[in-house]
Image (tube, helix red, strand yellow):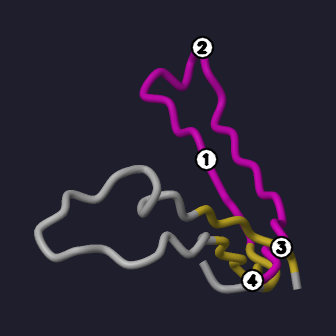
Amino acid sequence: MDAGTHTLKTSFKPKDTVNYATASYSVSINAIQATPIITWSNSGNITYGTALSSTQLDANASNTAS
């Protein structure tokens, strides 16, 4: 979804119109752009063939609204 205002619409159309009424609803959603922040500690040199561990695979990302 792109940043900006979007409209979410839903509707209910029953097969049984005697006991149930048609209904619909709309709501505006304001999506703001976020900037990812990636933190990753330098794990040092890795020798070829060494299996990666949580030391190398500990990156984290979060979003902040811009």
Sequence-earlier tag: 4 or 2: 2
Sequence-earlier tag: 2 or 1: 1
Query: Looking at numbered disc 4 in the image, what kind of residue is underneath it?
Result: Thr
What label sits on residue 64 in the rendered view? 3
* Contact flag, marks 3 and 4 (Cβ < 8 Å): yes
Query: Looking at numbered disc 2 in the image, what kind of residue is underneath it?
Result: Asn
Please name whichever residue, 43 or 37, is drawn nearer the observer in this view of the structure: 43
Sequence-earlier tag: 1 or 4: 1
Query: Looking at numbered disc 3 in the image, what kind of residue is underneath it?
Result: Thr
Question: Is residue 48 found left or right of 5 in the rendered image?
Answer: left
Query: Looking at numbered disc 1 in the image, what kind of residue is underneath it?
Result: Ser
Where does label 2 land, which residue? 19
Quadrant hosting residue 8: bottom right
Residue sticking out furthest to the top? 19
Q: How crowded is mark 3: few (under 14 residues within 10 Å), some or many (20 or more)?
A: few
Q: Nearer the viewer, mark 4 or mark 2?
A: 4
Judged from the image, the secondary structure of the residue bearing numbered disc 2 is loop
Instruction: Report the Cα–Cα distance between label 4 and label 2.
Output: 49 Å
